[in-house]
Amino acid sequence: MAHLYPIFLNLVGKNCLIVGGGQVAERKAANLLEHEARVRLVSPRVENNIAAWADEGLVEWIPREFQVQDLMGAFMVFIATDTGQLNQMITELCREQGILVNAVDDPPNCDFYVPSVLRRNSLALAVSTEGKSPLYAARLRRELEDIIGWEHGEYVDILGRLREEVKASDLDITQRREIFSRLVDSDLLELIKAGQDEKVEERIKECMSSWRD
């Protein structure tokens, strides 16, 4: 069996459907909202938070059982029910229509799995066991929290800003790569962690001096 293809998706403005209204559906909805997706949820009953989000206009709640037309316009579907037959039916419908589908705790009815993620600003580290052990993935993520601190997120944000500056210059690819290598191989990360802002700026100037001067 081939391993899964790792990917990060931009869900801003994408239509995402959740079938189910329990705690799992609530967590899925919260995560999707955090990533600015458009969330529609179908379930006769929902958790209080979901109902509140619906009242605020953050999610669209359809208070009934799933119907085929609910898939219309969906980019991605999460099935958060404990009914295997329903999961399979929705999965088959999604696959017929080319819609990505994930049935929680039901690997045969999943086109993708949601990894356990450690985020530090723009830096995201995703741990996946391809659905074999979500608890172990979560444990590894917790262990990484002690290794990858807040400073890594600040570091990546600085590198991103400088990368855009270099890309806007008239330097060729080789020169750009040399500057990027200097930045990554420098002690910027350690200086950021130590809170030495002045030295951070000094080090940036040193690394960028080949074309700024």
Image (tube, grey):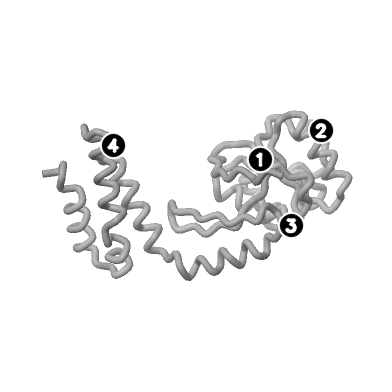
Please identify, in this view, whether the residue under mark 2 or under mark 3 is nearer the observer.
2
In the rendered image, residue 20, in percent from the top left (x then y), is placed at 77, 49
- Whether residues under marks 4 and 3 lie with C-beta atoms below 8 angstroms apart, the answer is no
5 lies left or right of 84 = left
* CA gap, disc 1 and disc 3: 18 Å
Tag 4 residue: 167
Q: Nearer the viewer, residue 149 or 65?
A: 149
**Looking at numbered disc 1 in the image, what kind of residue is underneath it?**
Cys
Q: Residue at (74%, 29%) from the top-left corner?
A: 97
Judged from the image, the secondary structure of the residue bearing numbered disc 1 is: strand
For marks 2 and 3, the one nearer the N-term is: 3
Label 3: how many Cα within 10 Å (few below 14, some 14–19, many 20+): some
Q: Which mark is residue 47?
A: 3
Label 2: how many Cα within 10 Å (few below 14, some 14–19, many 20+): few
Where, by quadrant of the figure, is residue 165 drawn? top left
Q: Quadrant of the C terminus?
A: top left
In the rendered image, residue 122, in percent from the top left (x then y), is placed at 43, 51
Tag 1 residue: 16
Q: Residue at (36%, 58%) from the top-left corner?
A: 154
